Each structure stands twice: as C-alpha cells, then as structure tokens.
Amino acid sequence: MSRIRFLVNGAPTEIEVPGMRRLLDVLREDLGLTGTKEGCGEGECGACSVLLDGQVVDSCLVPMSQVDGRIVRTVEGLALAARELGELDTLQSAFLVHGAAQCGICTPGMLIAARAYLDAGGGPDHGDIREAIAGNLCRCTGYQKIVEAIAAVAAGEVPA
Amino acid sequence: MTTRTVPRPAVAPARSAPDALVMSPGASAPGRAASFPLRREGPAKLTGTAKYTDDLVFPGAWYGATIRSTEARARLLAIELDPGIDWSKVVVVTAADIPGENLVSAIKEDQPVLVPVGGEIRHHAEPVALLAAPDRETIRRLRAGIRLVTERLPPVFDPEVSDHVFAQYEIGSGDLEAGFAAADLILEGEYRVGHQEQLYIENNAMIAVPGEGGGMTVHGSLQCPYYVHKALRKSLGLTAAQARVVQAETGGGFGGKEEYPSIIAIHAALLARKAGRPVRMIYDRHEDIAATTKRHPAIVRHRTGVMADGTLVAQEIEVVMDGGAYCTLTPVVLSRGALHAAGPYRCANVRVRARATRTNTPPNGAFRGFGAPQVEFATETHLNRIAERLGMSPAELRRRNAYGLGDVTPTGQVLRESVAAHEVLRLAVEASEFERIRVGTGAARLDRSGTGMVPVGPLRTGPGRIATGIGLALGWHGAGFTGSGEVHIGSVASLELTADGRIRVLIGSTEMGQGTSTIFPLMVAGELGLPAELVEMAPVDTALVPDSGPTVASRTAMVVGGLCISAARRLRAEVETRNGGLAFANVYLADAAIHGATRIDHEFEPYPDVSFDDTTYRGDAYPAFGWAACVAIVDVDLDTAEVSVREVVAVDDVGKVIHPIMCEGQVEGGTLQAIGYATIEEIKLKDGRYLNDRLATYLIPTALDAPRITTILVEAPFSGAPHGAKGVGELPMDVGAPAVVAAIQDAVGVWITDLPATPERILAALESAAAAASANPEGGTA
C-alpha cells in the first residue's frame, strides 16, 4: 500500500492504496467521482480522460504511484471556476447549445481533451481541433457538432 | 413538401430546461425563426452527474462474471469446480439454478440462458456458468477454477453451407424471364458484407437487486425495458409485479442494446437471487465485443436487366444472411433486408429470394438499419456499375428509375404519398455539385490510366499521389415496424395532468442519446400550448410507465410520438370541455386543483388503409418510407490505397423535423457509422471466434477520419402520424457505404464489392485490373 497525496479538482486528497491501482478506479470507486467513464480499459477510447498537471491522460492507464504530489482535474471540476457550483462553464455551455453531447458517455473525456486544447491556446481551426480530440472516440455525433462547439469557444463566440 | 437546410451554429432557447442552467443571454444567436429546447439531460451529462449503470452504488453489491465456452460447437459433459478452492465464499450459478425456463425470450426461443450439462454449445462465447464474488480480484482468481468438460462437435461457419434455416422469404412481381428477354444489358454481381459492431462507448451493464416477496429489480443500460421485463419473468418465474426494470442513463445503443440486455439481466438476476444481494454485471470492452450481437454478415447476388436508356426491366436478387448461433431477431432483420433489396426503383419484374441460416458464431442481431444497409450497399453498388456500363451518370440513371408518387413496389404496395426519392436525389446532386466534380475526377482518372503508375509504379510524393473521387447513392427506409408488427404490439403512451398540476409523459421509450427526453416534451407542449420545460418525463421504470414498444426501428418519434400527440389532444379537449372551452394553458392548474389528476392512456390504432399479409408478403410492407441520398468525396492514396472520406452531403427525408439540431445529429452520427462500415470496420474470424475483440484492433472512425458532413433535411410528411414524422435514426446508415465505394471507384477505377474497402482489398482490385488490362490491351481500363 502507498500513501498518495494529490489535488483533485482543487481539493487536497490523501489516500492509502496499492501503488498500481488505477487512477480511474480511485476516482470512481474511492472518491465517488463517477463522471469519469471507462470505455475500454486499454487507452483506446479516451472516455476516462482526465487532466494530470494540465495534460490529458487516460486515467485507466495511470497507476496511483504516478499521481503522488500532482494535480488531477476531472469533468466534475471543469466548472469550478464558473459562477457557482453546478453551473456549466463556457465549454460545457457550448457543447449543450451546439448539440455536441448525445448519449453523453464520451462527453466527460471529450470535454477534458477540449479543455486542454483551449488552455494550450488552441484556436478555431477545425483540423487542429480534430487532431486534439482524435484520442477520444464518439459513436453518436460524427464529431461535427463537437468540433463546432470547441471552435465556437476558441473563437470567443460563446460568452464566458 | 418543404425543404430545410439547417444553419449552424445552433441557438439556445429563451429559457432552458428546469434542471439546466440559465444560459447567458448572449448564447442565443439571432436569426432563427424558432428556437428549440436544449437537451433535457444535457447538463447532467456535461457535469458528470448523469448516472449510467456502472455509476450506481448499491451497498453490499457483489460483482458478477460469465463463464463462457471457448469452443464453437461442443457437447457440454460436465462443469467441474476446482476442489482446491473454497467455493462457499462465492456464488456459482449453472442451468440447474434457473427457476423458470432456460430460454431467452425472443422470436424463436432457441437460446438458453446457460447451456445445461448434456446440452450443445453453439458458439465460442456462449454462457455456461455464472460467478459472483464480493470483489473483482476474487472473480479473476476463481474463474479459472471453473472447468468445462466438453466433447467437440463439427462446427458450421459458412451460411451458404448451413442447412438450418432461421427464416426465408420470396417476394416477386411481374415476369422475370420476359424482363430479361427484353433487356439490352444484363449485369450480374456478387456483394459481401461482414459483421459490424455497434460499439456504443458504454459497454453493456446490468445490476440486479433482489427485493421483498421474491421480487427482482434490474437497473441497466438498455433500449427496450419491456423486452427485459418479459425475459426476467420467463426465466426467473416472476409475476409481472415481481419483475421490475429501470433504465439507467444509457451510453448509446444503435440496436446493440435491443435484445442482448435480456440475457445479461437474467444472468445478473440469477446471481442476485442465489447470493441474496445486489449483483453488478458490467461487461468490459473485450467481453462486449466478443459476446454480444453484431450486424448480420450477408452475401447478396444481383442479376439485373436494363434497357439502353437505363430503364430497369428485371431484378433478380438473392440474399443470404448469417444469423449466427441463435435466432435472436434474425427473421425480422432478414425481412427488412428482403423488402429493401430491390432499392427505391420502379421495376415491373422483380424476384427477391432471401434466407438466413445458423452458423456456429456468436448470434447476430439488431444494428441501426436492421438488414437494410447490407442489401442497399449491394443494390446501389450494382446500380452504379450499371451506370458505368451504360456510360450514364449515376444520378441520371436514378432519375430515370427512382420511385415517384403512384409507383408500385414489388410487394404490390402503391406509394400514395410521402415519396421524396427525386427530391433528396436532386438536392444531394445540387448541393455537392456532383456532375461538375465528376467531370474533373473522371478526366483525372483517365489521365492516370494506362500510365503504369497504378498500382505498382514507383512510390510517389506530392499531389499526384492522391486520387480524388465522388460517389452517389440513393436509399429508402421503411418507417417503423415491418408489416403488421405495430398492430401486433399495440403500444401505449400515457400522459398525465397530476393533481398538483404537473404534466407528465409516461412512455417506455428510452433516451440513449438520440433525444427522446427532449423531443417528447416539445411535441406534447406544442399540443397543449405550453412551454416545453413544463412537461416532465417520467423515469423509464416498468413500475411506472406503460409498454410503448421497443425503442427501435426509428419508430419512437414517429409512432410513440404520434401516440403522445394524440394523448395530448385528448387531454386538452377533456380539460377544455369541462372548463367551458377556456384554453388549456389558462385552466389546467385550476382544473387539477378541482378535479384532481387526469390521465390519458392512448393505444396504437392501425394506420388507415395500410395492410400487409405476413404469409404472402403482399401489401403495404411499411406505412411509409423515408428517403435518403448521399454524396461522398474521397481521397485515395495511390501508394497505400488508404481512403480518406473528405466531404459528405447527406440529404434525408424524415417526414417532419421535430428538433433540427438533434435530427442533424442523428444524420451526422449515422453517416459516420456508415463510413466506418465502408472503410475500416471489420471483424476477423478464426474457427468461429472474433480475433479483433478489443478497441485496439476493432477500429471505429476518430475525429480525424470523419468527413465534413453537410446535412439537408427534407420533410415529406406521412399522413398517418399526427405530426407527419417518419423517423431518422437508420436512414443515413443505408446510403453512406455505397456512396463511399462509388467514390473510390471514381478515384481509382475499380469496384470494391466486399466491405470494408480496406487498402488490401483496393490494392488487390487494382492489381487484378492491371493484370487484366495487360492481358487484354484492347479492353483498356477506366
């Protein structure tokens, strides 16, 4: 067992778990953050994407031993900077307005990949956006409305 | 008929759903005549608070697992438990533990819940025993301790060799031989399509919770709560009240959660019953791909007679589908395949013979399109080949043959209304500039031919390496259930004005991403003269909602939506009548306070003048048809034969657009699934086992593989539905693949007749074309 200290959505967290326990399982089962989904368990679908020190990672491939001292952000933490708890941030609002979420199971991971892209200064170019979300599979939308939603945020069309 | 091209971006409504956040005023874009509600459950999905099955917590729940056969066909002689293991701390279930019938409720009840000792194993992923334990580690450790003793039996993998026929149909009209005798050209062709996995991103999942008095509640990811309900009752010997099915948020279905959830629910319930506690049966991706149903593979043979001017005079079509090891929905899939096999074309002399047989592979089942994508790929590719042979534009060939009002289908159905084949074709050709682009791509292809550069020339770099092509397909999709299916089911939708003045829709139709929870309030509110956000949706729980039929066949908006609109009209009339004719919106609160709750249960009534004979296959196979055209532009890499689908124009007639953004979303998503079917999605089999049963090996399109899709929605309303809707989900799936294959041919000059059009198949076709050209220089290559 290892004692792991890390920040989850801004909250200092300390747990004792086997070092090889997956970050995904800790989030979902130990911390009750079930917004992060499991789609394949082998890093192909991106449904379990979270930000680890601002970088997109597949949390199904991250052992807890690599999380000590680091900053994790999940879909539940995306709107923390928004006006009040439970509200949508700009990106989430854009997804809602553009119809970018259908069944919603890929949505948390897709939002995380989009957040990282935008935080890195990504612009509204559709090709760049497609590249940025290519690690996140969606079976419902054909990606078009997802790309449009992200582009709208990048272009400042959706108010923060 | 109206045509509407939906502009983007979408627009936010003035007010959002009650649980949605208030949108910033600036989020509303001006210029849209009407506004539409945001996805009802969208905020929950976007904040991670929506609860899918695996997100539900039941204290004390155990984990369940399925022990499956590893042989394609065998006799099960014994199930042995390793004597070195203490089995008292876990639960093992075999067929002997099934209190009810050991059959999964379906059309022909041939599939056991678990293979009994002495019984026959019919596919390599067949469930034989179940195991539940307090944690997943114990499951991992113990499952190898359950050993199956079997005696191998010879398997059958070829559907054409199999002598066990699940279903067969023959549809005919006119005089086939006379048609061929009159034809100027007769063309034959054989087309093959393989398995396709639905690949919803949420794997199948069920949690069974035992209750008081022998009751059992199942929470799960599913499309059809009453299918699961019926299956639970049958196999667990429960009364209707003892069995309860609750749909959790469902992460995609596409048909893959139509019939397969029944067996998972039974498995979870058997374990929960024996363990006396909740049991979670959550499939991982490997198990989901390895064991659950796929789109039926098919072999389709065409022999077609045409006149020199392109008029179709004879179509002889043979369809063979591989049903897999058990019947599931195969007879209905095959029926839809047979009824769509001749395509949306006028032809006096037609014969379709279709059969589906049993093989020792996992059962095939429902997948968006339901038998139509297989046959329409064949028909459209065949028609495109005929156009090539006649030296005629594929669009012109279709203009000369596509159905119009008053035409008669091979079952004798007169198309009296709602026929938009020509309209969707014209719009797709115009919006894509099909003829202009085709002139350029055709000239480029001729320039390349005979240069020896394709396919075995030296490696190229630069623009010369990419060949561009454009392709077209036209399709039709019977709206709702085939034949008299809807009459047999007798669906019910309910609408309630509660005593405290709420308006609540009660339907068994499920939200799985397609928008049910958003469009039903919209439809009902429109009838009642209220804002959509005042209409609630009851949870999909068989203890609350009636059986509105399964959420399949693109029937939800059309059929169940129609029932809800009729229910709303009845509710409105009833309330207004007893309130002196005052408008419902002004009096319903007072009415509820005085009269208490009012509930309308509206049952399906047969569409007027629609009748079908299930035995002779004559009559109105569908109450109406939806029509679709697709134009695809592809780039083919001449060195690697990699195909990139760059642009698609999708034109779909859905009868009535209820929510333009969601309707577009259906077309875009369905189109991309069709492109995956055309280019990369393929199951490889060895001895009846799927070899690529993981997401690392079964590929679906990413954002980089997806084209830019221009969607044009057409409304040719169906008079039998109060709102005119004909459904949208499946239409785009029917036309994408043949359009892509036609575009590949336009680029490189070869026809790919087996899906998917992988680089290997394209290179092989190019090499054989080159070999044929050098053997017969006079023949040339196009």
Image: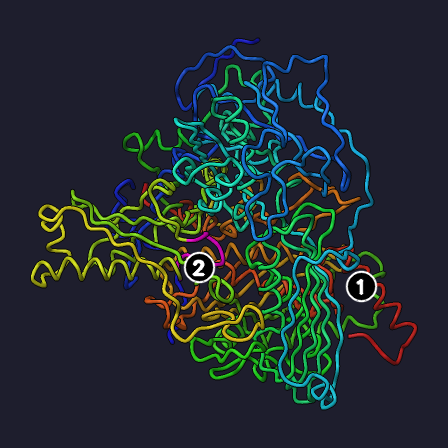
Name the main secondary structure of what is drawn in magenta: loop
Q: Is residue A89 shown left or right of residue B324?
A: left
Q: Which residue is mark 2?
A: B555
Which label sits in the foreground, 2 or 1? 2
Q: Is residue B663 above or below residue B228?
A: below
- For the residues labelled 2 and 1, the Cα–Cα distance comes to 40 Å
Chain of the residue under the numbered disc 2 shown in the image: B
Q: Is residue B122 shown left or right of residue A106?
A: right
The extreme left residue here reads B580
The figure's colour scheme reads: rainbow
Marks 2 & 1 on one chain = yes
Q: Which of marks 1 and 2 precedes in the sequence?
A: 2
Mark 2 Cα-neighbour bin, 10 Å: few <14, some 14–19, many ≥20: many
Identify which residue, B725 or B163, lies in the foreground. Answer: B163
Identify which residue, B183 or B614, lies in the foreground. Answer: B614
Residue at 72%, 12% (x, y): give it. B84
Q: Quadrant of residue B748?
A: bottom right
Q: Is residue B331 above or below residue B615?
A: above
Chain of the residue under the numbered disc 1 shown in the image: B
Identify which residue, B444 or B577, lies in the foreground. Answer: B577
Region in magenta:
B549-558
Residue at 41%, 47% (x, y): give it. B511
Residue B765, numbered label: 1
